[in-house]
Amino acid sequence: MRKLKQISLDEAYEGIEQNRLYFLYLYGTNCSVCHALLPQVEEVMKDFPQIIREKLNVHEIPAAAGAFSVFTIPVLLLYVNGKESIREARFVNIDSFRSSLNRIVSMLD
């Protein structure tokens, strides 16, 4: 399984800007929901190799919370051509998330 790469805020901005499909997982150090959801998200993302995927810890980089308007964690963000297309937060329905990804990716193929 391809794990999400830990990045900095500047790397997140670069990822959004430079990739057609870019996924960012925002989480916290002591967030049990974040840590429980991450393996499920990584499992879903295996089906979408064309999406660049990374993660950012908002406890280690507090400016990220403001930069991405994060009020609760975890947050799942998908950018298509630099524009936010999916935003899921806290309690995420993983099947619904997968369906949303399928819909967006199939429209771009």
Image (spheres, rainbow, N blue to C red):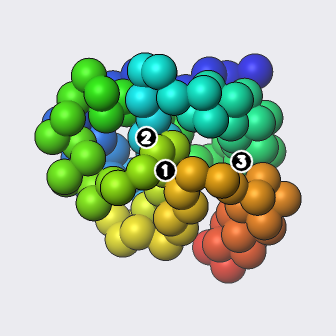
Q: Quadrant of residue 34?
A: top right
**Callout 2: few (<14), some (14-19), or many (20+) C-alpha neighbours within 10 Å?**
many
| Image quarter of the N terminus | top right
Which type of secondary structure does the marked residue at label 1 adopt? Answer: strand
Residue at the (26%, 47%) spot, across then down:
65
Residue type indicated by callout 1: Val
Q: Which mark is residue 75?
A: 1
Q: Does label 1 or label 2 sit earlier along the sequence?
A: 2
Residue type indicated by callout 3: Phe
Where residue 74 sits in the image (x, y, percent)? Answer: 51, 44
Q: CA distance from mark 1 to mark 2?
A: 5 Å
**Callout 3: few (<14), some (14-19), or many (20+) C-alpha neighbours within 10 Å?**
some
Answer whether labels 1 and 2 touch (C-beta < 8 Å): yes
Q: For mark 3, what is the residue? A: 48
Q: For mark 2, what is the residue? A: 26
Q: CA distance from mark 2 to mark 3?
A: 19 Å
Is residue 71 in view?
Answer: yes
Question: Disc 2 or disc 3, which is closer to the eye?
Answer: 2
**Callout 1: few (<14), some (14-19), or many (20+) C-alpha neighbours within 10 Å?**
many
Residue type indicated by callout 2: Leu
Q: Does label 2 or label 3 sit earlier along the sequence?
A: 2
Where residue 39 sits in the image (x, y, percent)? Answer: 72, 28
Is residue 102 in view?
Answer: no
